[in-house]
Image (cartoon, grey):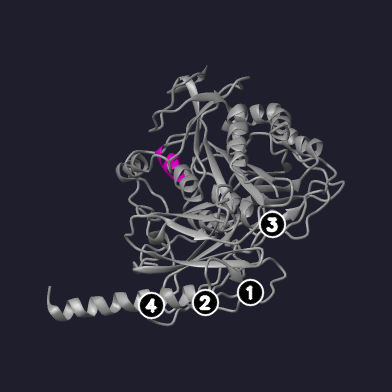
Amino acid sequence: MNPRHFFLCQRSLAALLCGQLLLAGCSTGATEFAPGPTRWPTPAPQPEPPRFPTPPWPAPIARTVPNFEAPSATHCARAVQTTETPGHLAGQRDDTDAAGGHGAARSSSAHEERARRIAPGEPSAEAPAAMPAPASPSLAGAGKEALSADSDAAPRFAPPAPSPQPTQRQHPVQEIVTAGMVDDNADFGAYLQFRQRTQVTHRPRDVSERYLLQVRNARGVPVADAEVAVQAPSGAAMWARTDASGQAWLHPNAFDPSGSAVYEVAVRKNGRQGTAFLRRGQKSGVDLVLDAAPPGQRARLDLVFLIDATGSMGDEIGKLRASVRSIAAEVARLPSRPDTCFGLVAYRDRGDEFLVRRHDFTNDLGAFQSVLDALQAHGGGDYPEAMTEALNETVHRLSWRGNDTTRMVVLLADAPPHLDYGGPQYDEDMMAALGKGIKLFSVGASGLDKQGEYIHRQMAQYTGGRFVFLTYRDAHRPGSGPGRETVHEVSNYSVQTLDRLIVRLVSEELARLPKAG
């Protein structure tokens, strides 16, 4: 190495280490919350965001503002509140743009924001007649604004699959629905191989380089649901919340195309904060001690069923309808005895009776069962459906509860999302979900093609969830009845009935929570 280059490298490394020592001298482990430039998502109404101490960066950082608000609801003791986005207007498809989930309108057309509330006493073909209206209407996207391949505001699409799209199939309702499950974060190498060999149209986010953040308190107890902000010197940023194990996966390439060499990782909870550095290429994870006490309350669970309600989904909806009470009963009997809120978001497509129908959280299981009983599989048409619009409403429009809540979405679908509509995009909303501490558990139903599998697994892996898939006696004949076979590229999985598998997923999440103080 040239002696001058060696000297410059030594000087840069020394400067970085000195910066860390200065930061450690000011803030060891956790300190009282102090002013600084880190930007956090804030609940509405938005007060002046708290700020962290400024680390010694080599250049000023342009801080990025989160594109979502932090979960902040305090309870779900309310009647079912339903909001509906129609799929058509006066018999026509609505091809105008609408606002996305980030609060910024994408079109000033007179047709934008067509969401309506199901008012008390208003008849509906599928929804119960008497339901209180929510505080605000939906802002689901309803446009056809195609992404430009040269746009700097959005990632490029991967090449489309050469094979034609399959058509959705009707199949008879079955009393038993079986499913398997894989954890792509646990077998990450196999997942990356799947991504590499699967060439389908999708919203690309590079997760090939990842680092595990572990947050514990001074006694070594995991700190769950702590807010995490990761910032690059350029200002590129991502947000997350630690899961029940006090962990979060960080993927720098997914949000920072400049490939920064070092990142500030700031963590806060209950007025306490800690800061560490992530150096690209480091072999170990990021361990951070945060002086936060264990939760002093009963475990809280926000559980949402996000369902494709088009015509081919009759058996899956029927099984969920028949088993939701038993699922709720088994969850209530878990050792943590969680305080559970239930939410339901159903979607179809443009031209159908509704695009998205959203039922906000409630703890009234009887009322929740009523709206699920009223949901019928109908409509559809082309193969992709309005999953992206429904995911956007699920992440941004439901009343997710605040601190010390386990947040889960069970997505049940047999088709990929439309990627040619304007408005929200699923990759942006899966990143916002991680920022709000929402795990997506994607359930691939019969007829889900390779593109759908890729996108389901993409959303589940990034948010820390699992990919679930229905299984049959004959993988290529869903009408063959329940069994152990699947067409998806998975291995080493066990099979259970779908309702038992949902309970298992909830149980595993809650079992990792630290005991209440």
> Is residue 309 positioned above or below 273 on the image?
above
> Is residue 177 positioned above or below 88 on the image?
above
Image quadrant in which the N terminus is located: bottom left
Residue type of the residue flagged with mark 1: Pro
Residue 452 on the magenta span = yes
Query: In the figure, residue 96 lies in which quadrant?
Result: bottom right
Left-right relation of 470 to 16: right
The image position of residue 44, as x and y in percent, is 71, 67
Residue type of the residue flagged with mark 4: Cys
| Disc with the residue nearer the chain's start (2 vs 1) | 2
Structural crowding at the residue carrying mark 2, measured as other residues with C-alpha within 10 Å and reported as few (<14), some (14–19) or many (≥20): few
Residue type of the residue flagged with mark 3: Gly
| Magenta segment boundaries in residue numbering | 450-455
Residue type of the residue flagged with mark 2: Cys
Query: In the figure, residue 347 lies in which quadrant?
Result: top right
- Residue 17, visible in the rendered structure: yes
**Alpha carbons under labels 2 and 1: distance apart:** 21 Å
**Alpha carbons under labels 3 and 1: distance apart:** 16 Å
**Alpha carbons under labels 4 and 1: distance apart:** 28 Å
Name the residue that disc number 3 marks.
402
| Disc with the residue nearer the chain's start (2 vs 3) | 2
Query: In the figure, residue 194 lies in which quadrant?
Result: top left
**Alpha carbons under labels 3 and 4: distance apart:** 37 Å
Name the residue that disc number 1 marks.
49
Name the residue that disc number 2 marks.
26
Task: Report the disc number at residue 18.
Answer: 4
